[in-house]
């Protein structure tokens, strides 16, 4: 079965320092990977996705993610963290084809990022 | 939150009462989804629909029901059979067949009194 894991419940970073939020996956076939961000009491916002092509994917708000097939990882990164980046981050993988041609997304448990001034 | 609206933002339910959560999208998306979010558990799929008048159970459909009478609307009813309904409910939509990105609404927080 497809799955995604976010090994850290929380990541603490000082403002201005680089940040990394980790994600590992397990899929059959080629992975379709996503990162979403959620601010308090809000819906999820799409950050970036990897379908195919370059292993380094650039997304919204200065975030990027590196796809590493050998390590089955898709870590989210940002060179310089902002206090406003503090939020809950979700990694997701597209599941296998289900009945009716539908592919659902499987989400990780989420990682809370706290950026301190 | 794109072109997806959910209402109400907060909802309180008494024991044994059914409640309906609204989800509307103006993105002309084919597919719509309902997720439940609990602390530390990520998002779990309740129901999804690919076309009007058709929907499928997700991973945790028990105690919930949906309808898809219009492309734009996908209301979720939390019935009295749902034993632990207090949660944050998120609606999403996407184009088909790729489903490469889902757009989420702002969510409804349901609390059982």
Image: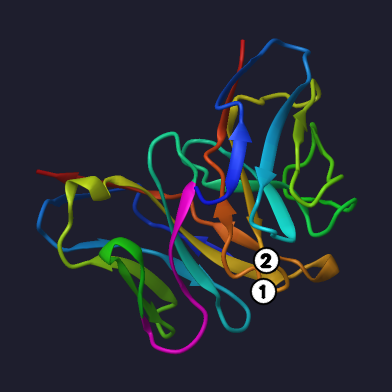
Residue A2 can be seen, yes or no: no
Task: Depth check: give the residue in front, A64 or B112.
Answer: A64
| Range of residues picked out in magenta | A44-56
Task: Tell me the quarter of the image containing the N terminus of chain A.
Answer: bottom right
Magenta segment includes A78: no
* Alpha carbon separation for disc pair 1 and 2: 7 Å
Q: Position of residue A39 (x, y in %)?
A: 38, 42
Q: Which residue is mark 1?
A: B98
Q: Position of residue A65 (x, y in %)?
A: 34, 72
At 26% from the left and 66% from the top, the residue drawn is A62
Task: Tell me the quarter of the image containing the C terminus of chain A.
Answer: top left
Dot 1: chain letter: B
At 88% from the left and 53% from the top, the residue drawn is B54
Q: Is residue B68 above or below residue A23?
A: above
Magenta segment includes A50: yes
Q: Which residue is mark 2?
A: B95
Viewer-side label of 1, 2: 2
Element type at mark 1: loop
At 57% from the left and 65% from the top, the residue drawn is B101
Tell me whether the residue at label 1 lies in contact with that at label 2, contact meaning CB atoms closer than 8 angstroms.
yes
Q: Is residue B63 above or below residue B31?
A: above
Q: Position of residue B36 (x, y in %)?
A: 62, 40
Asked if residue A9 lies left or right of residue B87, the reply is left
Rendering quarter of residue B103: bottom right
Magenta span: predominant SS is strand
Q: Position of residue A112 (x, y in %)?
A: 33, 46
Rendering quarter of residue B66: top right
Dot 2: chain letter: B
Element type at mark 2: loop
Residue B108 can be seen, yes or no: yes
Q: Is residue B65 above or below residue A66?
A: above
Asked if residue B104 lies left or right of residue A60, the reply is right
């Amino acid at each position: 079965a497809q799955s995604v894991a976010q090994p850290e419940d929380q990541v603490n970073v000082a403002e201005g320092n680089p940040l990394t939020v980790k994600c590992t996956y397990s899929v059959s076939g080629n992975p379709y990977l996503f990162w979403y961000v959620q601010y308090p009491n809000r819906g999820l916002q799409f950050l970036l996705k990897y379908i195919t092509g370059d292993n380094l994917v650039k997304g919204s708000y200065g975030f990027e993610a590196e796809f590493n097939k050998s390590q089955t990882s898709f870590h989210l990164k940002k060179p310089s963290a902002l206090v406003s980046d503090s939020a809950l981050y979700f990694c997701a993988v597209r599941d296998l084809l289900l009945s009716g041609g539908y592919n659902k997304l499987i989400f990780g448990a989420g990682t809370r990022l706290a950026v301190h001034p | 939150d794109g072109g997806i609206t959910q209402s109400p933002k907060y909802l309180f339910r008494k024991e044994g009462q059914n409640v309906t959560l609204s989800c509307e999208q103006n993105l002309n998306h084919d597919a719509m989804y309902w997720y439940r979010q609990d602390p530390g558990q990520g998002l779990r799929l309740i129901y999804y629909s690919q076309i009007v008048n058709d929907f499928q159970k997700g991973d945790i459909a028990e105690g919930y029901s949906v309808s898809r009478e219009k492309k734009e609307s996908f209301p979720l009813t939390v019935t009295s059979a749902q034993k632990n309904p207090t949660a944050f409910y998120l609606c999403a939509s996407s184009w088909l067949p790729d489903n490469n990105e889902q757009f989420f609404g702002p969510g409804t927080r349901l609390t059982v009194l």
